């Protein structure tokens, strides 16, 4: 056998060396856990397509929030399921809406947990779209006004961060302005800066009861074929005052995540979306994969591509595995 100047296996041969030279790390501090708060009491309904994820009334949300905090996960992101829906998503910006009351309950009972809120109208409109419908499409500027009101109502209820997910043009600037002029200049914005019109959202639409009643969301969410557009969208949100930018979904768009990491110095988040979660759960349930190994490999993939924060339904399991 010829002499080799480099043998990679010398370092791979011992676990202690593998740990010492590991290039990418994963910490519980990287995780954000999504939760679905439902109007009412005594509600804990498992989402059929998302094993282990529930629509829950506020008392159960608070109990799970305590568990999340005990696991060391620093933050949750909230989605709401109101008692009633209407054409303008009134509950989204109501003083005593489902999310506003959920924020108050978590901040009262689990004060050390950071509460991030999804800012969008799709969960609150009877048509399932992310804004006001005019002439068969979402009216961008009319919607932005309501999104700003929604973000302000979340801040007033005690949210630690707001996260607009609607993909309307100009919404980050409008939210920054309304927060700043109402005494909430300290509240950061995590913008869903690069959100694609994806088939991976199906299980979420069951969880949030937000399936569009007509058409689709391609007039406002991004074309999966586009790469350079992602840089333009992220730059626009940064210019408008975003503090964190996000890519959604995660696994099909790791190249986009890396593009943004190479281009921008802001903290970068990724949303490991419902369809990605459900596929892993289904494969694991059939013993086709090792769930823990695949989930942890997925999380490392997000970190390696450049994500600082990972929104994931796997967060509680990941936290437990990291503690072993």
Image (spheres, rainbow, N blue to C red):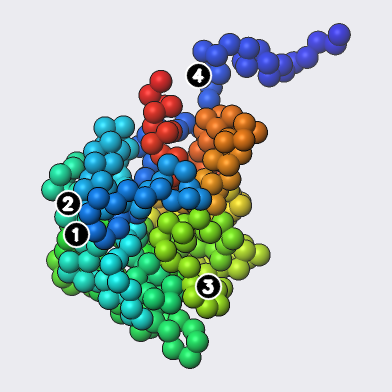
Labelled disc at residue 20:
4
Question: Are the residues at dot 3 and dot 4 in contact (C-beta closer than 8 Å)?
Answer: no
Toward the right, the furthest residue is 1
Instruction: Give the CA separation, mark 3 to mark 2.
Output: 33 Å
Quarter of the picture holding the C terminus: top left
Q: Earlier in the sequence, mark 3 or mark 2?
A: 2
Q: Real-space Cα distance between discs 2 and 1?
A: 6 Å
Residue mark closest to the camera, 1 vs 4: 1
Q: CA distance from mark 1 to mark 4?
A: 46 Å
Q: Nearer the viewer, residue 3 or 47?
A: 47
Dot 4 falls on a residue whose secondary structure is helix
Q: Which residue is mark 2?
A: 105
- Give the residue at mark 3: 217
Q: Residue furthest bottom?
A: 135
Q: Position of residue 58 (x, y in %)?
A: 23, 52
Q: Decide: is 174 above or below 244.
A: below
Residue farthest to the front, as pictured:
42
The tag earlier along the polypeptide, 1 or 3, is 1
**Badge nearest the viewer, 3 or 4:** 3
Q: Are marks 2 and 1 in contact (CB under 8 Å)?
A: yes
């Amino acid at each position: 056998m010829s002499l080799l100047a480099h043998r990679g296996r010398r370092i791979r041969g011992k676990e202690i060396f593998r740990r010492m030279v590991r290039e990418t790390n994963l910490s519980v501090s990287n995780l954000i856990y999504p939760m679905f708060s439902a109007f009412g009491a005594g509600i804990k309904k498992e989402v059929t397509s998302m094993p282990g994820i529930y629509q829950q009334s506020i008392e159960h949300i608070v109990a799970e929030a305590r568990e999340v905090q005990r696991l060391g996960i620093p933050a949750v992101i909230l989605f709401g399921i109101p008692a009633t829906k209407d054409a303008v998503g009134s509950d989204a910006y109501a003083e005593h809406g489902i999310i506003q009351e959920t924020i108050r309950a978590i901040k009262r009972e689990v004060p050390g947990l950071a509460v991030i809120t999804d800012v969008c109208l799709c969960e609150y409109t009877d048509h399932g779209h992310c804004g006001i419908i005019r002439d068969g499409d979402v009216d961008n500027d009319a919607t932005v006004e309501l999104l700003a009101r929604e973000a302000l109502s979340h801040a007033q209820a005690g949210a630690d961060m707001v996260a607009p997910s609607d993909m309307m043009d100009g919404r980050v600037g409008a939210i920054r302005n309304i927060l700043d002029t109402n005494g909430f200049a300290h509240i950061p914005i995590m913008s869903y800066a690069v959100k694609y019109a994806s088939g991976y959202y199906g299980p979420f639409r069951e969880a949030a009861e937000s399936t569009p009643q007509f058409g689709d969301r391609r007039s406002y969410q991004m074309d999966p074929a586009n790469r350079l557009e992602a840089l333009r969208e992220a730059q626009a949100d940064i210019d408008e005052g975003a503090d964190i930018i996000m890519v959604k979904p995660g696994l099909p768009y790791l190249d986009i995540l890396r593009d943004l990491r190479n281009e921008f110095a802001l903290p970068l988040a990724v949303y490991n979306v419902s369809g990605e979660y459900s596929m892993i759960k289904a494969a694991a349930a059939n013993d086709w994969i090792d769930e823990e190994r695949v989930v942890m490999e997925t999380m490392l993939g997000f970190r390696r591509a450049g994500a600082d924060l990972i929104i994931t339904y796997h967060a509680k399991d990941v936290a437990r595995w990291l503690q072993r």
